[in-house]
Image (cartoon, rainbow, N blue to C red):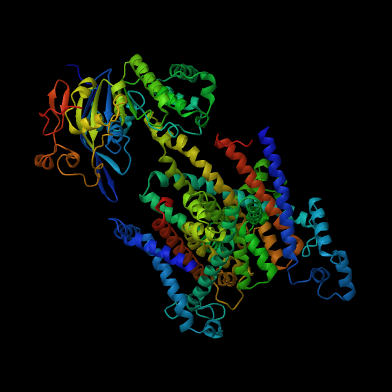
Amino acid sequence: MTDRIAVGMLGEWAQRLLGSESHGLQTTFRRIRRNTLSVVGLGIVGGLVLIALIFPVIVPRSQVELTHLDSMFLPPSLGHPFGTDEMGRDLLVRILWGTSISLQIGILVVATAMGIGVPLGAIAGFFGGRIDDAIMRLTDLFLAFPSILLALAVAAALGPSITNALIAIAITWWPWYTRIVRGMTLSLKEEKFVEAARSLGASKARLIFKHILPNCVTPVIVNGTLDIGYAILATAALGFLGVGAQPPLPEWGLMISTGRLYMPSRWWVSTFPGLAILVTVLGFNLVGDAIRDVMDPRLRA
Amino acid sequence: MGMLRFLAKRLALLVLVLLGATVITFVISHAVPSDPARMWAGPRAGPTQLEQARRELGLDQPLYIQLAVYISRVFRGDLGVSIHTRRPVLNDIAAFFPATFELTTFAMIIALALGIPMGVVSATRRDRLPDHAARIFSLTGVSVPIFWLGLLAQLVLSSTFHILPTSGRVDSSLLAIAPPAVSGLYLLDALLAGNWPFFASAFVHILLPALTLSYASLAIVTRMTRSTMLEVLGQDYIRTARMKGLPERAVLYKHALKNALIPILTIVSLCYGFLLAGAVLVETIFDWPGMGLYATNAILTLDLPAIIGVTLIVAVIYVMINLVVDILYTLVDPRVRYD
Amino acid sequence: MTQDLLTVEELRTYFYTEDGIVRAVDGVDLQIPSGSIVGLVGESGSGKSVTALSIVRLVERPGKIVSGRVLFDGKDLLSLSEDEMRRFRGKEISMVFQDPMTSLNPVYSIQDQMEEPLLLHRNMERRQARAEVLEMLRKVRIADPEKVARLYPHELSGGMRQRVMIAMALSCKPKLLIADEPTTALDVTLEAEILDLMKTLVREVGASVLLITHDIGIVAETCDSAAVMYAGNVVEFADVGELFANPRHPYTTALLNSIVNPRRRKQRLAVISGTVPNMLHPPEGCRFHPRCPFATEKCAEAPGQLSLVGPGHSVACSQHSRDVQAS
């Protein structure tokens, strides 16, 4: 059922893009091309995905974790463009390998948070009354804490590991999606097409999943894309503090934390992983903005 | 009259949030695989000492009684004793809180004082060079990991060029002439006492951490100001203002900005949350003796009473900030009335 | 003949949009004598509002005044610097906009907003200005001015807000008041009152009015003369009596026909066939020709020029010599 909705939506979007009217494809391409930042963003994210998919296949994990005592702390050079770390491992290789870790975590966090938050939001908005109140109190409670602190506490309680970091961040993020979807559901359920469907005898579940949720897709997708970047930031932060990824995993935040001990003389160990994070999150932000511009120009800043 | 009732309702909400927070942290702490009794008694304690520790900590009681006891303690102001420092958690927090408060407030001031003008310029010179520069600046601000930025700032400004100090709140040699601690905020206390050397040193020390901490918030404030100003400038009443022949300065700063402040205020409470979270990371890097550092240590040593205490205090702060912002709304927007 | 207060010559204002150039005002001529009320009638999208905004140079991006002259009291407003232009706005020329709900700043009181032009243009002191504000509110027939002055816009009704706008616009005794659809957003019952109010106050101050509307009935009631606009051009201009008695342009005739006559039973609603032209690609030649029942090949080639067909009566139609009577 849901795939049909998804396909239908993609089809509609594609049609809008390819444009039966005089605008459509031309305008879209013009807008995208003119906006070089979007192109840059797409390029970055595309490149990252490629690296994340290919690199772990080419370079086995063991190579990334082996210690080479004879090549510790080599500064950046032709042989090691980013230098080597405290265990003699080539930094560039580790960073590229870490791309797949970060991307996987980022996507999983967002998917989990959405999986919890979106249905809850739809239910809250649709049924209203006590159910809505209960769900809203719950979201308020979670939102009463700055999310990173809550994630920190949860991750610490569960024990330091990257999977627990994932769970921790997802737990603190779902309220945002609930809020968004609830708001949209509240306004959508008054729309005529919902009333029409209801009068035709559609069940509540059908109304929610077939009629209301598909119309919430736009802000959810825009937020979701942006959030992948922020999820990566949060994971890195937890890794930095020691409650996320554990050594010898080449997670960027963890690498910065380890490298910190050797600042300022061996500056490259912490600097390059941070650069990787910056570029990645930047890429996702640009893509998120671009998606927003295409799907709903009204939201454009 | 409506205002008092509003305040009362909000304070009641605060109590509810505290209650909920207590329960949540209590639940989380009991999911922890470590044994608090062992942590308290120490790794070399024998079975009898462990039993004693267990009884002391009230761990032999059923869970709901433990929860009830804990809740009643919290509302009396007793947050337990830190396993790590062996001091009452409340005292620890009172000692560390001012440093964090000073840092986050300074960062918030920077974010607003720089961000709002930048946003206005960005909006009025839309799509031209200042706008593009500001947007790139903002984009990097929300994309950069704050702890890395701090490290980088330390590397460049402290270690390489020796412009600013690397860590700490003040030059340790000046501690001998420290002003009396009225607020715990070094800058304020020094100002009140007229102690200029101390003030200068404290200022120079807070600059780097505060700037690092504020970067993300600065970016958000700039972006928000820009988009709000653009929206406001498209409104009919701006056209009316121009039609009256008002100078452009008055149109922007009197008519437009006051309206733009309303959504910006919303961002302030959101930003403060980011700042508190970021403080944890920034304090670690700059050895800033604040609650962030305390919290991190507590978490890494699994010092549960401390963790729970910090979480509660943070929740309280957050709710208070929201309250302050809501009150500020009524000052800025005459349409907002709580009755 | 005394010089007109306002003369617009060949005004062109174009909008440079992503999809192309919209020639919203494409060669508009207008004359407004002193102390008279001139109407500017046309459908939505005909360019009336843009003309008005062009006169006071408040056209915003992506719009731009491309060419033409706007002679006010002999001075060409389009040649002035922005600073010089600002001295005219609010003082010599004033404007009332269509939507009173959004035209007042929600975060300042009525008093604060009405004071501004007084403090700026008439160099009054605070206390003087305050008193004058109350006086102006009384003039626009608002009961209890002291209370209303301290209120905020969201606490007033639409009708009251529009009165405030009118009061504010006339507070510095301008020579020209431009009213852009001042009653469109209001109830019909208020319409007559607001128009009457405007007429009275304007006569008092000795100002002229450019009244923009899509309602030809308002023109009949309120205006001394009127210009009919279609798709960016003025197609007919005459004194109101003459315009209604002897409309020459087919569009004017069609407009007049579309007024429902309550006295005639079984009257078919007259409709102007076709649709408003796409301003990105307007028709060649006379822009009305696709919808005109009298169009010839000549009409598709060259646009009509405004030419005099009687005293004070000009028409832009290649067939202006033909007698077209209102039925």
Residue at 39% across, 49% down: B130
User: Is C211 situated above or below B277?
Assistant: above
User: Is B312 situated above or below A161?
Assistant: above
Q: Is residue C269 left or right of residue A162?
A: left
Closer to us: A275 or A229: A229
Residue at 47% across, 49% down: A192
Q: Position of residue C283 (x, y in %)?
A: 18, 44
Residue at the outermost top position: C204
Residue B234 found in image quarter: top left
Q: Is residue C196 visible?
A: yes
Q: Position of residue B214 (x, y in %)?
A: 55, 53
Residue B299 found in image quarter: bottom right
Q: Position of residue C106 (x, y in %)?
A: 49, 34
Residue at 52% across, 84% down: A63
Q: Position of residue B178 (x, y in %)?
A: 70, 49
Q: Is residue C157 left or right of residue C207?
A: right
User: Is A196 situated above or below C259?
Assistant: below
Closer to us: A39 or C241: C241
Residue at 58% across, 71% down: A254
Q: Is residue B175 visible?
A: no
Closer to us: C268 or B1: C268
Closer to us: B125 or B235: B235
Q: Is residue C2 left or right of residue A10?
A: left
Q: How many marks?
A: 0
Q: Name the quadrant of the N terminus of chain C.
A: top left
Q: Is residue A271 left or right of residue A148?
A: left
User: Is A36 situated above or below C101?
Assistant: below
Q: Name the quadrant of the C terminus of chain C.
A: top left
